């Protein structure tokens, strides 16, 4: 016996599609948070090396920023994630906290639309 064919969408298939997309987004958030955690560790290590080597210039020097001192000590992507003060623009904690609140709200809204 086979199920009858329908011309309209079935709720269970829509639910499974929404659930699968949210599982994918949770995995993507884990990957992003893990990457940012590793970037943060590399930046902290580079900041310690720059400080230990004495590269820091006086703050009164024009056009000086801690980010410029770290140029040769971090990778290109890590360097792009730095603000002028040498700290990261987005940290793994920011991504994790955002998703803690955004994920349940978005999931509830998506199920409410179904």
Image (spheres, rainbow, N blue to C red):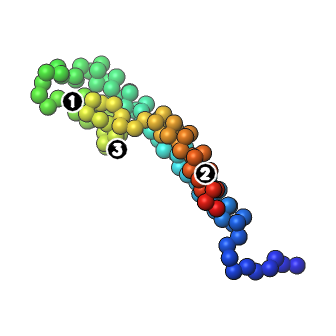
> Contact (CB < 8 A) between labels 1 and 3?
no
**Depth check: 108 or 89 in front?**
108
In percent of width and height, residue 73 lies at 30, 33
According to the picture, the residue beneath numbered tag 2 turns out to be 107
Q: Mark 2, residues whose alpha carbon is within 10 Å: few (<14), some, or many (≥20)?
A: some
Q: Which mark is residue 65?
A: 1
Q: CA distance from mark 2 to mark 3?
A: 32 Å
Q: CA distance from mark 1 to mark 2?
A: 42 Å
| Quarter placement of the C terminus | bottom right
The first of marks 2 and 3 along the sequence is 3
Residue 59 vertical placement versus 35 (above, below): above
- Looking at the rendered image, the disc whose residue lies closer to the viewer, 2 or 3, is 2
Q: Quadrant of residue 90?
A: top left
**Depth check: 74 or 35 in front?**
35
Q: Residue at x 81, y 77 (%)?
A: 3
Q: Residue at x 36, y 34 (%)?
A: 88
Extreme residue toward the right, this view: 1
Q: Quadrant of residue 13?
A: bottom right
In percent of width and height, residue 25 lies at 55, 51
Q: Which mark is residue 20?
A: none
């Amino acid at each position: 016996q086979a199920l009858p064919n329908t011309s309209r969408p079935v709720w269970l298939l829509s639910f499974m599609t929404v659930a699968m997309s949210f599982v994918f987004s949770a995995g993507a958030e884990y990957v992003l948070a893990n990457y940012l955690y590793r970037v943060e560790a590399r930046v902290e290590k580079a900041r310690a090396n720059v400080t230990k080597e004495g590269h820091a210039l006086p703050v009164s020097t024009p056009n000086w920023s801690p980010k410029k001192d770290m140029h040769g000590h971090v990778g290109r992507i890590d360097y792009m994630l730095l603000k002028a003060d040498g700290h990261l623009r987005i940290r793994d904690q920011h991504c994790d906290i955002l998703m803690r609140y955004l994920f349940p709200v978005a999931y509830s809204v998506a199920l409410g639309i179904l």
